[in-house]
Image (tube, rainbow, N blue to C red):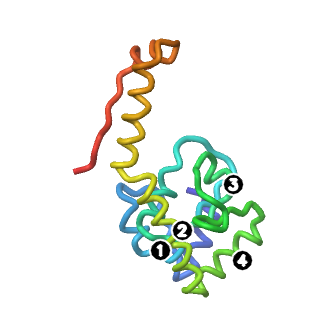
């Protein structure tokens, strides 16, 4: 963890810098706004849909939400300029009505399009199409193992 960041956070009684945690959900539950200020990175972007599913407003950089199907200004706020990013976060913290509107829209979209049932339905449709297709995608899929894990 960055020493300068830790020192700054320690001086602010309303900021908790945790580092890695086993389960992010208790921290998300306490947040009024979830920020994703990534400037570089790769990998999955699962924390944003998790926050949205929990009914949280999310502010992210473009790279932080890269590849996600959410609309800027509708279900998520995307901003790369640090000052504008901070202004959006402050506005959401101060304006409960605006924050609630975005929380509701984000949660509705995640529940509608990214819950287990819709994901499994989409996967079944893809696999059915691939099975019917005798092209190269069939050989690629047949050489891979696929597991769909459902949470209890």
> Pointers 2 and 1 in contact (CB under 8 A)?
yes
**Which mark is first along the chain, 1 or 4?**
1
- At mark 3, the secondary structure is loop
Circle 3 crowding by C-alpha within 10 Å: few under 14, some 14–19, many from 20? some
Q: Position of residue 4 (x, y in %)?
A: 64, 64
Q: Residue at x 71, y 69 (%)?
A: 85
Q: Nearer the viewer, residue 106 or 14?
A: 106
**Which mark is first along the chain, 2 or 3?**
2
Q: CA distance from mark 4 to mark 2?
A: 14 Å
Q: Residue at x 70, y 73 (%)?
A: 86
Q: Position of residue 31 (x, y in %)?
A: 47, 74
Name the front one of labels 1 and 3: 3
**Residue 84 falls left or right of residue 124:** right
> Pointers 4 and 3 in contact (CB under 8 A)?
no
Q: In the rendering, which numbered label is found on residue 87?
A: 4
- The residue at which mark 2 appears reads as 34
**Residue 43 falls left or right of residue 91:** left
Q: Nearer the viewer, residue 70 or 40?
A: 70
- The residue at which mark 3 appears reads as 62
- At mark 2, the secondary structure is strand
> In the image, is residue 42 above or below residue 128?
below
Q: In the rendering, which numbered label is found on residue 118?
A: none
Splitting the image into 4 quarters, where does residue 6 fall? bottom right
**Residue 4 falls left or right of residue 144:** right
> Pointers 4 and 2 in contact (CB under 8 A)?
no
């Amino acid at each position: 963890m960055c020493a300068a960041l830790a020192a700054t956070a320690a001086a602010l009684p309303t900021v908790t810098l945790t580092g890695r945690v086993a389960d992010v959900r208790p921290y998300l539950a306490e947040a009024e706004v979830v920020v994703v200020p990534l400037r570089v990175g790769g990998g999955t972007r699962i924390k944003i849909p998790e926050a949205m599913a929990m009914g949280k407003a999310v502010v992210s950089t473009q790279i932080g939400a890269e590849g996600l199907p959410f609309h800027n200004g509708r279900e998520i706020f995307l901003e790369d300029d640090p000052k504008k990013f901070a202004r959006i976060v402050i506005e959401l913290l101060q304006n409960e009505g605006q924050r609630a509107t975005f929380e509701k829209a984000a949660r509705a979209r995640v529940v509608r399009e990214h819950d287990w049932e819709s994901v499994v339905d989409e996967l079944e449709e893809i696999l059915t199409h691939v099975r019917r297709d005798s092209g190269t995608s069939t050989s690629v899929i047949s050489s891979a193992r696929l597991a769909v894990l459902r949470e209890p």
